[in-house]
Image: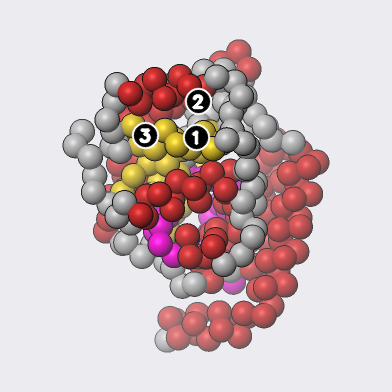
């Protein structure tokens, strides 16, 4: 596949184990270029990814010296991509959950609507932990309140296409969105900025340890962080509510 000039795939990676190599190969099968940001991994995958990249000019590996969080890793890749003239990035997780065969469909949707945020709308199967599903329903309810029900089907699913410049500008202006809060806060704040939302159904698979699945999700820590995130976002939402209401009224008129 010839490299695309404006859209790339960006994969943040932290101690993912061998599953990352399958994820990267699948992403490369469906798109080029693909960039991986190794977020201070200590499991040896960074070095092995560099070896893969040495044999593939459309695979680039960016390495951070220490673990800084998902949002910080994504921002690092976005800033480099912006400097090299890319306009959009599809983010996907390194753990094999996201559907690489849908990359081209998401990119085509973005190319047809460059200002839009193209969101994956996850379709869960029996492998999805029930406690995770219940938690994301609560998170999604809060996001829909904070965006006045403008159409966010899922706020936590990281398989999505971002317009790079507005997201980088947004992140440079504040110190949040550097960790697990990135996916939620990015969609809320881009929605506040008036970006159109496109939702596309995408299957999700949760891999068991026997299948190579590794999860860094901590139920109490990460849900506490999301609670703090929504407290901050709701406070900001109240401040910008008049503007959002006027915009929605104008669009419906």
Where residue 92 appears, as percent x and y from the top left, is 47, 40
Q: Which quadrant of the view contains residue 251?
A: bottom left
Where residue 63 appears, as percent x and y from the top left, is 49, 35
Q: Is residue 154 magenta?
A: yes
Q: How is the image coloured?
A: secondary structure
Quadrant containing the N terminus is: top left
Q: In the rendered structure, find residue 46 and report the number of the disc placed on it.
A: 2
Q: Which residues are magenta?
A: 148-167
- Could you tell which of marks 2 and 1 lies nearer the N-terminus? 2
Residue farthest toward the front in the current orientation of the protein: 65
Local crowd size for mark 1, using a 10 Å CA cut-off: few (<14), some (14–19), many (≥20) = many
- Find the distance from the CA under tag 1 to the CA under tag 3: 10 Å
Residues at marks 1 and 3 touching, judged by CB atoms closer than 8 Å: no
Q: Is residue 204 magenta?
A: no
Q: In the rendered structure, find residue 60 and report the number of the disc placed on it.
A: 3
Local crowd size for mark 3, using a 10 Å CA cut-off: few (<14), some (14–19), many (≥20) = some
* 36 and 28: which is toward the camera: 36
* 156 and 216: which is toward the camera: 216
- Disc 1 designates what residue? 63
Residues at marks 2 and 3 touching, judged by CB atoms closer than 8 Å: no
Instruction: Give me the residue at 43% from left, 24% from top.
Output: 49
Where residue 139 appears, as percent x and y from the top left, is 68, 54
Where residue 110 appears, as percent x and y from the top left, is 32, 55
């Amino acid at each position: 596949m010839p490299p695309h000039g404006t859209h790339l795939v960006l994969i943040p990676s932290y101690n993912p184990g061998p599953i990352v190599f399958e994820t990267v190969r699948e992403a490369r099968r469906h798109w080029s270029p693909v960039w991986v940001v190794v977020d201070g991994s200590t499991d040896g995958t960074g070095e092995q990814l560099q070896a893969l990249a040495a044999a593939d000019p459309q695979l680039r590996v960016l390495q951070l010296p220490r673990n800084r969080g998902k949002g910080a890793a994504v921002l690092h890749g976005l800033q480099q991509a912006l400097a090299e003239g890319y306009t959009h990035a599809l983010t996907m997780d390194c753990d094999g959950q996201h559907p690489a065969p849908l990359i081209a469909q998401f990119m085509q949707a973005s190319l047809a609507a460059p200002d839009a945020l193209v969101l994956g709308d996850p379709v869960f199967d029996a492998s999805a932990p029930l406690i995770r599903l219940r938690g994301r329903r609560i998170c999604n309810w809060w996001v829909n309140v904070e965006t006045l029900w403008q159409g966010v089907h899922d706020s936590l699913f990281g398989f999505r296409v971002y317009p790079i410049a507005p997201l980088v500008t947004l992140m440079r202006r504040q110190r949040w969105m550097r960790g697990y809060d990135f996916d939620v806060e990015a969609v809320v704040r881009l929605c506040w900025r008036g970006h159109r939302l496109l939702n596309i159904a995408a299957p999700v698979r949760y891999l068991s340890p026997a299948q190579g699945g590794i999860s860094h999700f901590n139920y109490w820590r990460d849900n506490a962080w999301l609670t703090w995130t929504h407290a901050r976002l709701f406070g900001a939402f109240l401040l910008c509510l008049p503007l959002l209401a006027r915009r929605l009224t104008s669009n419906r008129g």
